Image (cartoon, grey):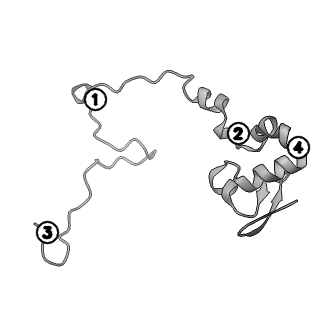
Amino acid sequence: MEEIGASGGYAVKLREYNYQCGSYQVSGISCCHVMVAISYYYGRAAVKDQVTEFVHNSLTKSAYMQTYVGMILPVPDQKRWQEVLVCIIIPGYTELMNPPPHSVQPGRPKK
């Protein structure tokens, strides 16, 4: 199926979620070219019902609600943080955690 606009034509393959303008591949939201193709294929009255089929699953209301299902506990203040002396992120690596070495960059220092 092809939609032809003022700036030229765009190929729209609805069932493959492949749109030549690239909008869906970038954002997951159907562009105006897809809306025209849906209205042509399904009929103008069915656009409202069919448009949700062409939106990425991560952008649906149910996916949004799933984001906040679990409880998010607040982070305690810095006085209650446990002191970490060794690197525990990499197993078997027990070097003390220090900031990276400071090196003076060439050129005039900024004020």
Name which of mark 2 and mark 4 comes first in the sequence: 4
Residue under circle 4? Answer: 43
Label for residue 110? 3
Q: Quadrant of residue 53?
A: top right
> Where's the N terminus, which quadrant?
bottom right
Q: Check if mark 1's residue and mark 2's residue have beta carbons within 8 Å.
A: no
Q: Count all numbered tags in the image, as a single digit.
A: 4
Under circle 2, the secondary element is helix
Q: Nearer the viewer, mark 2 or mark 4?
A: 4
Under circle 3, the secondary element is loop
Residue under circle 2? Answer: 57
Q: Check if mark 1's residue and mark 4's residue have beta carbons within 8 Å.
A: no
Q: Check if mark 3's residue and mark 2's residue have beta carbons within 8 Å.
A: no
Question: 12 or 102: nearer the eye?
Answer: 12
Q: CA distance from mark 3 to mark 4?
A: 64 Å
Residue at image location 35% in from the left, 46% down from the top: 94
Q: CA distance from mark 2 to mark 4?
A: 23 Å
Is 57 placed left or right of 17 in the picture? left
Q: Amino acid at mark 1?
A: Trp
Residue at image location 69% in from the left, 61% down from the top: 22
Label for residue 40? none
Residue at image location 13% in from the left, 76% down from the top: 108
Q: Is residue 86 above or below residue 34?
A: above
Is 85 placed left or right of 17 in the picture? left
Q: CA distance from mark 3 to mark 1?
A: 35 Å
Q: Amino acid at mark 2?
A: Asn
